[in-house]
Structure formats: C-alpha cells, structure tokens
Image (cartoon, rainbow, N blue to C red):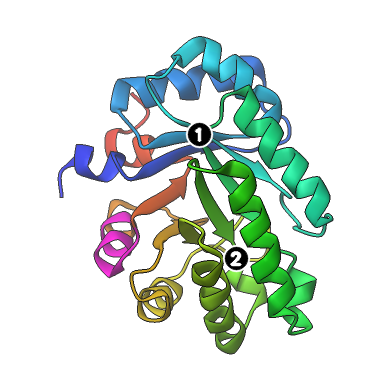
Amino acid sequence: MTDQEILAKVDHTLLKPDAKKEDIKKICQEAMDNNTASICINPAYIEYAKEIMGNKIPICTVIGFPLGAMTTESKIFEAKDAIKKGASEVDMVINISKAKDGEFDYITDEIRQIKNAVGDKVLKVIIETCLLNDEEKIALCHCVTDAGADFIKTSTGFSTGGATFHDIELFAKHCDGKCKIKAAGGIRTREDMEKFIALGADRLGTSSAIKILYGEK
C-alpha cells in the first residue's frame, strides 16, 4: 500500500484530556496536509476545528467516552449536540457493564436510538474488546449490525488494551459485511496498519500514523 492509501483510512486522533488549542490546530493542519479520513477529537473542540478546516476534512468526535456508562438519554444529547456543532462522524462507547451482564437487547436498542439521532452521519460503535471474551464480542457484532450502525470499533485507547489482529478477524467473520470495521488503540508500526487493513479494517484510529510514515518531519 502507498502512504496515501493508508492515510485515507486513518482517523487522525487526539483525545488526550490535556490537549490544548494549539494541539488541535496542529492535527487539523496535519490532516489537511495528508488527506486523512478524518480527525477524531473531543466534543469541546468541534467548532474550533470546523473554523480551521471548514469542510476539507470530516470531523469525528466521541460520546459516552471513555467508559460508556452514561444513560442512553445523555448519549443521545451528546450525539445531537456534536452533529449540530459540525461533526460528521460520531464514535460512541457501549455500556460495557450491560454487555458483561448479557443485556444485549439494551445495547442494540441504545445503538439504534443513537443512530436515529445522528441520521445520515456516520456512527461507529466502540465495544472495548480488551474487557470482553470472544462470546461477548460476537454477540456485540450482532448488536451493532442489527442496530444499523456504520462501524464496529475495537477500543477507546483508554482501557487495558487496544486493537488486536484476532479481534479484526473476529469482526470480519461475524459482522458479515453488514458494517465496516475500525481498529483503534496501540497501532505502532506501518506493518500493523497494513495488516489491520488486510484483515478487514476500513478505518484506523491512531494519533501516530503520520509520524510512523514520515517521521518527526
């Protein structure tokens, strides 16, 4: 793959709680210079990023982040507010406790309500694979596809682990092409990026892709 083919699948990400406006401005410029798929930032900076980039690069944001333990109503409000402020992609975190309790109907319904709230905008669903067993991951593949979300996503990057090749293979098998796949968290090399894409990931969530491909320059 060429560098640009990889970058076209990257959500150029900055979700650190101590990120400053100058950091947001930097990743906006990097995204425009390198034609990434989007930038992924916390909701408070959506309008600022929109001022810098206009419609040149899509803005992705996160809701229910990073724990997913908020109420459905609060997540719906966050999603609508994010779209109103200029986001065109929303990455939501499921209620992981509900998954551990086997309440998959609750999760499906929550995803469906949030997808209804964002309408034709892109909804990605973070299931936090590092906290789940394979049986739970498979059940959540069905939750995501049954609810009509656009992507299933591995990780927040704020828990005990990130994306694994095994999880992307599992998603590809059990989502059966009904939604796209995003690998996020712990992507450290060009080889990682190429393999995740080869296994079926259509997006990569990473803060490091440009640095990996081009170095500090």
Helix, strand or loop at label 2? It is loop
172 with respect to 108 (left or right): left
- Does the magenta run of residues contain 88? no
41 with respect to 166 (left or right): right
User: How many marks on residues?
Assistant: 2
Give how far across and how far down residue 6 sits, in percent. 26, 45
Give how far across and how far down residue 77 sits, in percent. 76, 40
* Location of residue 55 by image quarter: top left
Question: Is the residue 134 above or below the residue 217 in the image?
Answer: below
Give how far across and how far down residue 99 sits, in percent. 72, 77
Q: Could you tell me which residue is drawn at 38 percent across and 68 percent down?
A: 178
- In the image, the segment drawn in magenta is 193-201
Helix, strand or loop at label 1? It is loop
The residues bearing labels 1 and 2 have C-alpha atoms spaced at a distance of 27 Å
Label 1 close to label 2 by CB (< 8 Å): no
The three-letter amino acid code for the residue at tag 1 is: Ser
The three-letter amino acid code for the residue at tag 2 is: Gly
Q: Residues within 10 Å of mark 1 (few under 14, many from 20)?
A: many
Q: Which residue is mark 2?
A: 161
* Location of residue 155 by image quarter: bottom right
Question: Is the residue 10 above or below the residue 198 in the image?
Answer: above
Q: Which residue is mark 1?
A: 88
In the orientation shown, which residue stands out farthest toward the top?
51
Q: Could you tell me which residue is drawn at 50 percent across and 11 percent down?
A: 52
Give how far across and how far down residue 108 sits, in percent. 64, 70
Q: Earlier in the sequence, mark 1 or mark 2?
A: 1
Q: Between residues 153 and 211, which one lies in front from this camera angle?
A: 153
* Location of residue 45 by image quarter: top right
Q: Between residues 114 and 183, which one lies in front from this camera angle?
A: 114
- Does the magenta run of residues contain 195? yes
In the picture, which quadrant includes the C terminus? top left
Q: Residues within 10 Å of mark 2 (few under 14, many from 20)?
A: some
